[in-house]
Amino acid sequence: MLQRYHRASAVGSAIVLPTQCFHFTTDTDSTRLYTNPSSCCTADHSLAAGWYRFTGGDGTRLVTIPLTTTGRCGSSYPGWWNGTLPIMAGATTVENICFYTGDSCSNQFHQ
């Protein structure tokens, strides 16, 4: 399912957005912010598969720098986006999510 997003322009162009841009679960938990030093313990393994958007006190951007310690983001094993983010509205990319478990990017998930 695609949804159109209309941006103002002289020619009235439209961008077709992928599903994950409008079908997602919102997470407003401020303990998920990457600067949160809490080491315990949000367990994401129980979450349903799908798209999640972090908003509010926990920020709105993905962590894109390697995390080199356990106990960040309110998680025992913090994760970060290990790739290049799209720069155009409606664009997507396929990259890896890395998790720090004692060795940088020792566990990766392709998304």
Image (cartoon, rainbow, N blue to C red):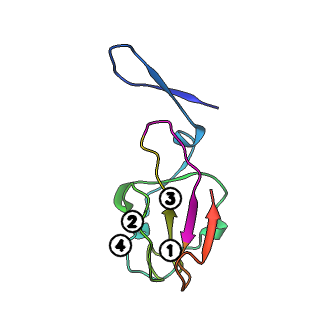
Residue 82 on image: x %, y %: 51, 63
Can you identify the residue that label 1 sits on?
Answer: 78
Q: Is residue 2 above or below residue 69?
A: above
How far apart are the alpha carbons under marks 4 and 3? 20 Å
Main SS of the magenta part reads loop
Residue at 63 percent of width and 65 percent of height = 109
Q: Which label's residue is closer to the chain start, 2 or 4?
A: 2
How far apart are the alpha carbons under marks 1 and 4? 11 Å
Q: Quadrant of the N terminus?
A: top right
Q: Which residues are magenta?
A: 88-98
Residue 35, numbered circle: 4
93 magenta-colored: yes
User: Left or right: where does residue 30 sit relative to residue 44?
Assistant: left
Q: Which label's residue is closer to the chain start, 1 or 3?
A: 1
Q: Which label's residue is closer to the chain start, 1 or 4?
A: 4
Residue at 55 percent of width and 29 percent of height = 3
Q: Quadrant of residue 62?
A: bottom left
How far apart are the alpha carbons under marks 2 and 4? 10 Å
Q: Which label's residue is closer to the chain start, 1 or 2?
A: 2
Residue at 46 percent of width and 46 percent of height = 86
Comparing marks 2 and 3, which lies closer to the viewer?
A: 3
Three-letter code, disc 3: Gly
Q: Is residue 109 above or below residue 10?
A: below
